[in-house]
């Protein structure tokens, strides 16, 4: 009984969400490598905690597919411009610098 009273009296104070401070983390671009690592972490968490992580895992999959698609489109656009210039084509749009 004395041990219970001691624990009750000497319990650490509970911190509310308002006590938490946001940490300012520098923005890093979403890269394929970062998204793939995040997917592995989400998969490990799904294995431990079950379906709770499914929405996050699926969101990461969608983001990874979007980044890959964007990079593919950028690569295709560069190839198109290179082939156009190599064929001696005139500039399609006059860019002012």
Image (cartoon, rainbow, N blue to C red):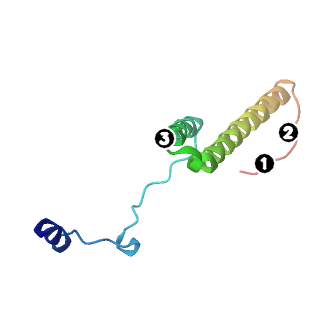
Residue 95, label in figure? 1
Tell me which corner region of the image, top left, top right, bottom left or bottom right, holds residue 82.
top right
N-terminal label among 2 and 3: 3
Residue at position x 39%, y 75% in the image: 18
Rendering coords of residue 68 (x, y %): 69, 36
Q: Is residue 70 above or below residue 27?
A: above
The foreground one among 22 and 16 is 16
The foreground one among 53 and 96 is 53
N-terminal label among 1 and 3: 3
Q: Residues within 10 Å of mark 2 (few under 14, many from 20)?
A: few
Rendering coords of residue 24 (x, y %): 41, 61
The foreground one among 87 and 68 is 68
Q: Which residue is mark 3?
A: 48
Q: Which residue is mark 2?
A: 91
Residue at position x 71%, y 42% in the image: 66
The residues bearing labels 1 and 3 have C-alpha atoms spaced at a distance of 54 Å
Instruction: Kindly state the secondary structure of the residue where label 1 is placed.
Output: loop
Rendering coords of residue 89 (x, y %): 88, 31
The residues bearing labels 2 and 3 have C-alpha atoms spaced at a distance of 56 Å
**Quadrant of the image for the N terminus?**
bottom left
The foreground one among 35 and 31 is 35
Residue at position x 76%, y 51% in the image: 96
């Amino acid at each position: 009984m004395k041990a219970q009273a001691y624990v009750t009296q000497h319990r650490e104070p509970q911190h509310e969400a308002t006590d938490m401070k946001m940490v300012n983390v520098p923005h890093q671009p979403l890269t394929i490598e970062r998204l793939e690592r995040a997917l592995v972490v989400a998969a490990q968490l799904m294995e431990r905690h079950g379906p709770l992580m499914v929405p996050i895992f699926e969101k990461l999959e969608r983001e990874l597919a979007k980044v890959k698609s964007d990079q593919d489109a950028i690569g295709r656009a560069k190839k198109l411009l290179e082939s156009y210039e190599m064929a001696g084509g005139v500039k399609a749009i006059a860019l002012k610098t």
